[in-house]
């Protein structure tokens, strides 16, 4: 029996990984092409960083696929979902590449009008300078991410990242495809504060890499580190559709802004985490995934019985908002849950 099991696991793995190897080869190749396109505006360190990390992703994802097969966790990966995740990242990277020249232009313009000159600080106390870049960017990212969760217009873009019902390293690549179109607005204050645009891009890449790596079920709690930094446990909460977990843990690298602004939630050890969107939907292809929430918005807006103000509310208010209470926002659901808990005490 034991022998049979070993054989079946390894043959499944071979079948799975062979397919993935082929797909990854294609994607990694395309990824490198898109990086070459970006090269002129990357500093040397960032180029090296990407050259090392990009092929490493294929390796660690394959390792996680191997482990999930080995431990019999067949639901952790699905071929279709993984391919969708990688298509999302390619689309996002293409748009990001196109936007990056424009973004750099904007950042340089704002940098010309900077309020502080940080050159001396960068030379005399590089640790303080780079820490400030990280803290500043994480602060801006926190509010970008919070906006994406609190207004349906932005959620329509970001919901693609949350629409997988799996949780694994490849989900980190399930990008919010249209995000590069508006994300740069949140970069601009950092240039006004005197952070050099290429320094910002470097920290942006480092935090992104960290943000990809927390998409795993194989790491539990990390004592002390978890007080300040995002851990896989924190980000599992972020991807969960369990009501107490909705709109929690927005940080990419630092968890402190969530703790300060009241959006922090601890992973509960005895609660099964349900990944994906609140409303489970069969999304069959990448276009369905990308346009899912836009279609939902459109079907609300085209209703003839609603006035303009109500239609605007359907576009810009929190996801789940409804004029007649037929749907609920995360805050309404959480308040109802708290009331039920209080009533049962
Ligand atoms: Zn999110
Ligand atoms: Zn994520």
Image (cartoon, rainbow, N blue to C red):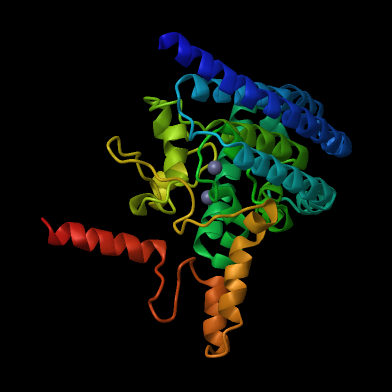
Of residues 133 and 184, the one drawn nearer to the viewer in this rendering: 184
Image position, residue 123 (x, y; %) = 71, 27
User: Does the image show residue 132?
Assistant: no
User: Does the image show residue 277?
Assistant: yes
Task: Classify residue 278 by image quadrant.
Answer: bottom left
Image position, residue 200 (x, y; %) = 70, 40
Q: Quadrant of ligand 2?
A: top right
Which residue occupies 39% across, 46% down? 264
Image quadrant occupied by the C terminus:
bottom left
Q: Residue furthest left?
A: 345
Task: Classify residue 157 by image quadrant.
Answer: bottom right
Which residue occupies 76% across, 53% down? 110
How many numbered discs sit on the rendered protein?
Answer: 0
Which residue occupies 68% across, 35% down? 205
Is residue 49 shown above or below 322?
above
Of residues 245 and 284, the one drawn nearer to the viewer in this rendering: 284
Which residue occupies 44% across, 26% down? 219
Image quadrant occupied by the N terminus:
top left
Is residue 11 shown above or below 272?
above
Q: Is residue 290 left or right of residue 147?
A: right
Q: Is residue 188 left or right of residue 261?
A: right
Q: Is residue 94 left or right of residue 303?
A: right
Q: Which residue lies furthest to the top in this view?
A: 3
Q: Is residue 56 left or right of residue 280?
A: right
Image position, residue 90 (x, y; %) = 75, 43
Task: Classify residue 65 by image quadrant.
Answer: top right
Image position, residue 58 (x, y; %) = 68, 25
């Amino acid at each position: 029996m034991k022998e049979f099991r070993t054989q079946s696991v390894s043959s499944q793995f071979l079948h799975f990984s062979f397919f993935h190897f082929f797909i990854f080869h294609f994607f990694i190749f395309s990824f490198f092409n898109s990086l070459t396109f970006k090269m002129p505006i990357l500093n040397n360190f960032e180029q090296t960083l990407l050259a090392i990390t990009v092929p490493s992703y294929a390796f660690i994802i394959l390792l996680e696929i191997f482990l999930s097969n080995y431990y019999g966790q067949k639901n952790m990966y699905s071929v279709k979902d993984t391919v969708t995740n990688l298509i999302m990242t390619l689309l996002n990277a293409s748009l990001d590449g196109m936007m990056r020249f424009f973004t750099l232009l904007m950042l340089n313009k704002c940098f010309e009008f900077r309020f502080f000159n940080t050159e001396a600080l960068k030379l005399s106390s590089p640790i303080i300078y780079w820490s400030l870049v990280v803290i500043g960017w994480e602060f801006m990212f926190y509010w970008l991410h919070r906006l994406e969760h609190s207004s349906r217009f932005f959620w329509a873009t970001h919901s693609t990242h949350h629409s997988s019902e799996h949780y694994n390293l490849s989900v980190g690549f399930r990008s919010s495809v249209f995000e590069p179109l508006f994300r740069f607005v949140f970069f601009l204050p950092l240039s006004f504060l005197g952070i050099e645009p290429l320094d910002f891009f470097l920290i942006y890449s480092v935090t992104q890499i960290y943000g990809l790596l927390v998409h795993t079920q194989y790491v539990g709690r990390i004592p002390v580190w978890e007080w300040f930094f995002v851990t896989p446990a924190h980000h599992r909460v972020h991807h969960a559709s369990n009501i107490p977990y909705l709109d929690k843990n927005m940080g990419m690298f630092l968890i402190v802004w969530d703790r300060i602004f009241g959006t922090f939630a601890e992973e509960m050890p005895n609660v099964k985490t349900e990944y994906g969107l609140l409303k489970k939907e069969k999304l069959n292809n990448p276009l369905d995934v990308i346009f899912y929430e836009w279609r939902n918005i459109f079907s609300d807006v085209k209703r003839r019985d609603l006035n303009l103000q109500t239609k605007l509310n359907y576009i810009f208010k929190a996801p789940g908002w409804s004029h007649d209470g037929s749907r609920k926002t995360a805050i309404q659901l959480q308040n109802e849950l708290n009331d039920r808990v209080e009533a049962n005490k």
